[in-house]
Amino acid sequence: MSATATAVNHPALPEEIGAPTPARPRLLLLATGLVSMAVAVGYSALVGIYLYARAEVLHSGEQWLPRGVTIPLTQPNMMMFTLVFSVATLAWATSAMRNDDRANFFIAVGMSMLFGFAYIAQTGFLLTIMELGVRDDTRAPLIYALVGTHVVLMVAALAYLAAMTLRALGGDYSAKDLEGIYGASLFWYTTVGLYLVLWYAVYITK
């Protein structure tokens, strides 16, 4: 075989090969994790204040809830199941995007956001039937602080998920890059986990 044929069949490698493109640091996911931990710690501290005040009232021989105020369990339980369903649909969305199944991704995200809005609506209805005035009793602000703070967290989770969904719609996220979807899911799961704390501390123990 001639030298010319060898050169054609086996081209020489370039003398200088550029270094591979470095992986982009997952700053968004890291920041979301830090924010989620801070939110969890802050909300846990708020729950601790609530439980301490409740224990002080119970030890004095009084009832915790003001007279005439009742907290039904139907709405809180439905809210819990609603958020649990949203965890399943959001996991479905993440799996769909990992497989580049964008149609199922948008369907699953839409269902997750629908569950989030349903939770907010159910919370508003529950507060109306509780008939607990903010100025009627000193215990009312503690209850409203826990419930209201969690509603704000859910609004933030919805906004985060909506922003990442719009970026996915624009082509920023795909099976090769799921950082934003993972970040939105992490904050959403944190919010759902904190509701379980709220559900037991306020609605179950009363």
Image (cartoon, rainbow, N blue to C red):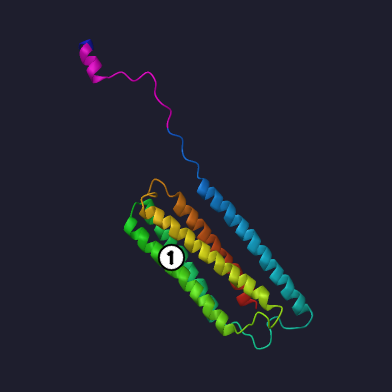
- Tell which residue pokes out farthest to the top in this image: 2
- Residue at 52% across, 72% down: 80
Q: Position of residue 167 (x, y in %)?
A: 40, 53
Is residue 181 rendered to the left or right of residue 130?
A: left
Q: Amino acid at mark 1?
A: Ser
Q: Circle 1 sits in a helix, a strand or a loop, which is it?
A: helix
Q: Position of residue 72 (x, y in %)?
A: 57, 83
Q: Position of residue 2 (x, y in %)?
A: 20, 11
- Residue at 46% across, 49% down: 179
User: Is 10 in the magenta?
Assistant: yes
User: Is 122 in the magenta?
Assistant: no
Q: Is residue 184 above or below residue 199?
A: above
Region rendered in magenta: 4-20
Dot 1: few (<14), some (14–19), or many (≥20) neighbours within 10 Å?
Answer: many
- Tell which residue pokes out farthest to the front in this image: 135
Is residue 187 rendered to the left or right of residue 58?
A: left
Is residue 113 rendered to the left or right of residue 45?
A: left
| Image mark count | 1
Q: Quadrant of the N terminus?
A: top left
Residue 127 picture quarter: bottom right
Magenta segment's dominant SS is loop
- Tell which residue pokes out farthest to the bottom in this image: 68
- In this view of the protein, can residue 192 be seen by the observer? no
- In this view of the protein, can residue 40 be seen by the observer? yes
Read off the residue under disc 1.
Answer: 112
Q: Position of residue 172 (x, y in %)?
A: 39, 49
Is residue 132 rendered to the left or right of residue 29?
A: right
